[in-house]
Amino acid sequence: MKTLSSIELHLDQVAPGLRLYIDARKPDTLFDGEEDAAEHNEARYQLMEGFFYDYAFNHPNYQLGDVGENIIIPHKRNTHTGTLAPNIFTGTLTIPILYNHQPEPVTSIELEVQSTKTSYRNDYRDMLELITEKCTDLLLQSNAPAAHYFDIDYTKNSQTLYQKFAFIKSVIGTDEFAEAIHRIVTAPVTQWADAPEPRDVRQLRRLSNAHVKELLKGGSPAILPEALKKAGFHSLPRRIAATRKTDAVDTPENRFVKHALEVFLQFCTEVHNAAAPQSKLYKESLLLIRTLEGFLHHSLFAKIAAPTTLRLNSPVLQRKEGYREVLRTWLLFDAAARLVWTGGDDVYQGGKKDVATLYEYWLFFKLLSLFQSLFQLNAEDISQLIEKTEDGLNLRLKQGRHYPVKGVYDAGSRKLSIRFSYNRSFSGSKPYPDAGSWTMHMRPDYTLSFWPAGITEAEAELQELIVHIHFDAKYKIDHLNKFLEPSSNAALAQEKKDNSKGIYKNADLLKMHAYKDAIRRTGGAYVLYPGHKDLTRKGFHEILPGLGAFPVRPSKTEDGTGALKAFILAIIDHFINRSSQREKWAYHTFDVFKQKPGEDHILNEPLPEPYGANRDLLPDDSFVLIGYYKSAEQLAWIRQHHLYNFRTGSGAGGLVLDAPTVSARYLLLHTAGQQHSGELWKIVSKGPQIFSRQELLDKNYPSPTQSHYLVIRLAPVPEPELHHLQWHFKNLPNYTSGRASAVPFTATLAQFMKVVQGRE
């Protein structure tokens, strides 16, 4: 394909000497495809998506008409000049030429817009073929019938005609189908047949009933043996009709192949006749007609008659190379001809060839196949992908339309509910803890959700038990360096300049961050692109939460789904782990945010900062133990030995060893008659220890009366923020007045600091 800097289109058929000039603003973005454009049914002159071109007529009365999507941008004053901006359009761009702003075009020109990916032609064919195969597989889940009758009005709906042709072309216009026909014509199936031939009567070795009848008819006079004369033979024919065995190609299987080619040709002919002259459909169907006619002109098919029945259960059709491919193509053709895909308008309506959108649809089927191999997906949900309409059978897949498939994963030790969603929307209008986004409405291409089996999805959302993993299709990304470029100072400075011009190179990465950070309960967001290298970034230590990219390529041999499958398997192992950090994080998120904060959650008193040894000093989760001392002698003993003792047993004053008591960080002492106290100590023991009465006597404890005590070890409070304070402990929620005032109780540090009376 020849590279040009500008092209000159001659429009003498419109007006003598009329010319249209198109100039490329960037080198290597404008081409002359004279050599191979016709082979691919493409326009001769080719642009590239995402680039800009200047155009101008040499006569001010002519201008380019609008084709939508802001592709044609005429100059405000000189409308015969302007800019061509294909943006993300790929395919054949048919542009009308207008005279003096009149609505009816005087003619039109065709320009081809290439994708920036060099493999887009093969990718487009392979992806459309797989989508067709997956859709038709849904229609062919039952066993193939032994006899088949085919009667379809292909041109019933002109609006879906190109869509049907695109589906069927992906079935019968492939290299694999052409190779199958080649195998058949070079090594066809044959069968023995009787061919008539006259034979000399003297050469007969065995006489059949037919031979005897021929002999009895008589023939030329001849000298016969006496035995024959006595038997009544007076003359015998010199030659009689006989048969010989031949290898014939007129078999039921070959008749089927010929019939299939004729039906395919009939379809293409009807589509060609229904298409607008010189349209893309008109040209593409003509190319396919010529291909099929070339197959049928082979001498093999001249020897084959029309079939009476189609034996689709023939072992030859189902097993022999060439024949089995034709049988598969026939079955796919049957189903594809009945299938309508409204979503296909996004891909190829108006002559465009939107490979990026097709990649998104193609990925849905690749992911569906992958998840079917890993999970027990609901067969009814999958079957509903095809729905009955007035036009026939419609593929429900369409951009912007939500399509979910539910399932389960049973690991034995844990059972998970699964939901795979295409185009699921996460609303930004619902408050926490409802499902959705906390910023704006978002809709990832694909979402895989996990939650414990046995509860509803809504309940799992409310209890932080669900995890969403999002995937977005990015066909335009070739390499990961376009997704995660090194962020040097120079790169960041250039990025800032590009952003000011509206150019966002890291938009795909930012979108993944937006999904992960804005959509509630998202465990990860990942790009799927047709490259070769995978990349994952962990938010912390485990596989989730994370960001990354996985290569999934339109290829029949190595599509790259291995890395993605390994990632999904690792996620499954992660969910089976009941003690994962993410599981703990999810619980604490639920525990912290399950209630809206009220006035009792406000605490503005000075407290030690939570760092170092006090990193876990959270006022609502740290506890203070309030204990009673009965005399000045006991207080002096506590201060001397840094010990404090509680009664054991269930009697009055006994210590209840609940979680707040055992984990208490501080101890406040008070005695009879006090309204407030400043006797605060730091608890340094890991938990209460049991001391006998004698052990306390050995330490000069004043008058122990119990046989055993629970004892905790103390130290002066090291934090200066808690020095010289007085606490009105009787205002604490768990305080009991009267005789029970000596019973020990606990309070959270937040409650405790709210009863501060002031400094001493």
Image: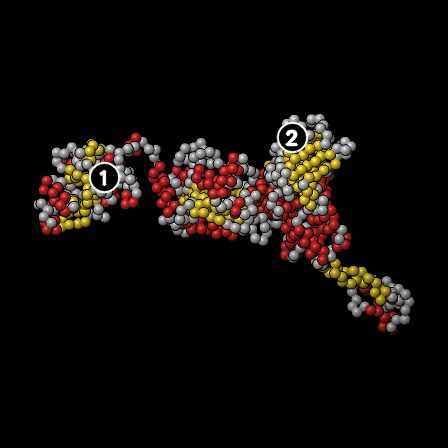
Kind of residue sitting beneath label 1: Pro
Q: Looking at this view, is 275 or 229 the one in front?
A: 275
- First reached walking from the N terminus: tag 1 or tag 2: 2
Q: Secondary structure at mark 2?
A: strand
Residue 550 visible, this orientation? yes
Q: Residue furthest left?
A: 703
For residue 208, which numbered disc appears in the image? none
Kind of residue sitting beneath label 2: Pro
**Image location of residue 335, percent across then percent down:** 63, 44
Q: Residue furthest front?
A: 490
Callout 1–callout 2 Cβ contact below 8 Å = no
**Image location of residue 386, percent across then percent down:** 57, 41
Please say which color scheme the image uses: secondary structure
Q: Is residue 267 left or right of residue 453?
A: right
Q: What residue is disc 1 on?
A: 720
Q: What residue is disc 2 on?
A: 74
Q: Residue at x 68, y 42 (%)?
A: 4
Spatial distance from mark 1 to mark 2, Cα to Cα? 74 Å
